Amino acid sequence: RAPARGRLAPRASLRARAAADGRVSLFVKVTVKSGQLDAYKRTIEAHIVNCFANDRCMYFDYGVSDSDKDVVYLYETYEDQAALDEHKASAHLAEYLSKAEACTVSHDVTTLRLAPFGSVNCNYAGECELDGGAWD
């Protein structure tokens, strides 16, 4: 749910501080078994909800490749290395991997350390924060 206009969500401020401390992102290429895309979408969407509820996850989204409908790309960003380590040790990640096994062939994970330069955090109301200062 979007916060009221004119206020920044408390989490947005945490995200701005985390940006300066070294965010960590994962790019994951998931190869889905033929005919299993809908089952995988249900699995990954439930996992994304769990990550936002249980992890210090700043961003998590997915998309299906235009050129290969059996390939899904995940993009995840965590506040810092400790947050990523917590995620990797979580019960909900183990549950996701167990459920995903039935509908996927592979997960190819690339880790990327994001530079703080140019980091902007926006909420769904369109309010943004850059280096601790709010702007519309």
Image: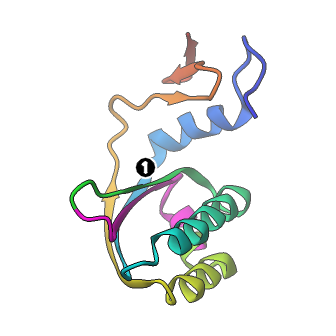
Picture residue at 51% right of the left edge, 73% below the top: 40
Q: Which residue is mark 1?
A: 22
Task: List the single residue furthest toward the front.
Answer: 35
Residue 85, placed above or below residue 116? below
Picture residue at 56% right of the left edge, 23% below the top: 132
- Quarter of the rendering occupied by the C terminus: top right
Residue span colored magenta: 68-86
Residue 93, placed above or below residue 75? below
Which one is nearer the viewer's eye here, 70 or 95?
70
Which one is nearer the viewer's eye here, 133 or 101?
101
Residue 44, placed above or below residue 23? below
Q: What secondary structure is found at the residue carrying circle 1?
A: helix
Which one is nearer the viewer's eye here, 82 or 76?
76
- Quarter of the rendering occupied by the N terminus: top right
Magenta stretch contains residue 80: yes
Picture residue at 73% right of the left edge, 58% below the top: 53
Magenta stretch contains residue 2: no
Tell me which colouring the rendered structure shows: rainbow
Q: Confirm whether residue 28 shows in the render.
A: no
